[in-house]
Image (tube, grey):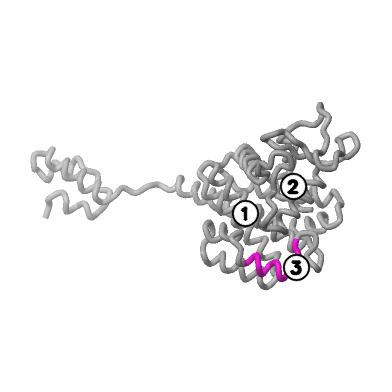
Amino acid sequence: MYIAWSMKGLSERVFDTSHNDVSCIICYETDKTKQTDWHRCWICSATWCDSCMEQMYNAARDSEDIELACPQCRGSIASMQLKSRISHITATIGCSSETARAIVNYENLLTETVHLCECEEDGQPYFMVAPASAARVMSRDPICQIVSEKQGHAEDSQLRRMLRSADYSGAIELVLKGYVHVLRSDAQVPSASPYIESLAEYLTEMRNAKLSSCADVADSLLPIVTRVVEAEREAERAAAHTASSEAARPRRRRRGSQHADSEDLHQAAGGDPQKAYATTPLTDYEDWNSLGTN
């Protein structure tokens, strides 16, 4: 199952299970009897295993009447995860909280698009309908709104057309370019490449894990991510070259400043054009008229 990069190791960031006995409040399995990721409520400290978390997520996604909440205190799990993801992104990338929220929205969009590639012909285990039908619904969903807000109306329309035509690879590449655009716009982020590179490393780990559909999806995503990384590196090299060229180029003095300098010297010479001429270097033939000679 593909999960967003900022959610990788979420349970380890929330709490350390190495020195505590942990048991699932739902199925009663423990960390001694079950090797899995664990989740904890930030409000009441209840814990549950990853497989139960997946069942809770699927139930909340498939029903409007069920909210993804802690099984014990009913605190919102989505709110807890959002805070952890934003904290992780800002700490890792060094961006602002606003940029981190935009990255989370892009990650959510990317995850659902990847699920369209990963699911079975009937949409399982992510959708209740075939992926083509799910993609058409998704093209009208507010989840795509982040593209319009950050990349513009043209890219937003293109993304929705790609989803309706089942061009999922193109949609994924467009979303990844949105990541880059958001990071470039943040003055606190010197380069967007490291984040996209970390995403490529994450996909490489998934591929090497040999976990059936995850490995297949990682194989198909890696070339797309690699193209985006290479394009961003090339753009950054070009920008650096342009900046160095601008810094090395000698600056010409403005005509206005030369004219002002010559007038000052003319007045200092007591109005004598010959004295002014003797003390004034001619750097521009047009300044000749400013000396008062005819």
State the image coordinates of residue 4 (x, y, percent, origin top left): 70, 50
Q: Give me the residue at 85% from left, 39% from top.
A: 28
The amino acid beneath tag 3 is Val
Cα separation between marks 2 and 3: 32 Å
Q: N-terminal of the two: label 3 or label 1?
A: 1
Q: Which residue is mark 3?
A: 129
As helix, strand or loop, the secondary structure at mark 3 comes to loop
Which of the two marks, 1 or 2, is nearer to us in this view? 1
* Relative to 109, residue 50 above or below: above
The amino acid beneath tag 2 is Glu
Q: Which residue is mark 2?
A: 201
Nearest the eye: 52 or 286 = 52
Which region is colored magenta?
127-139
Nearest the eye: 197 or 151 = 151
Q: Can residue 226 be seen? A: no
State the image coordinates of residue 229 (x, y, percent, origin top left): 66, 53
Circle number at residue 106: 1
As helix, strand or loop, the secondary structure at mark 1 comes to helix
As helix, strand or loop, the secondary structure at mark 2 comes to helix
Which of the two marks, 2 or 3, is nearer to us in this view? 3
Report whether 284 appears left or right of 14: left
Q: Main secondary structure of the magenta part?
A: helix
Nearest the eye: 174 or 37 = 37
The amino acid beneath tag 1 is Tyr
3 and 1 marks in contact (CB < 8 Å): no
Q: Can residue 187 be seen? A: yes
Circle 2: is it few (<14), some (14-19), or many (20+) Cα within 10 Å?
Answer: few
Q: Give me the residue at 53% from left, 41% from top.
A: 188
Report whether 267 appears left or right of 250: left
Q: Give me the residue at 56% from left, 43% from top.
A: 190
Cα separation between marks 1 and 2: 18 Å
Circle 3: is it few (<14), some (14-19), or many (20+) Cα within 10 Å?
Answer: some
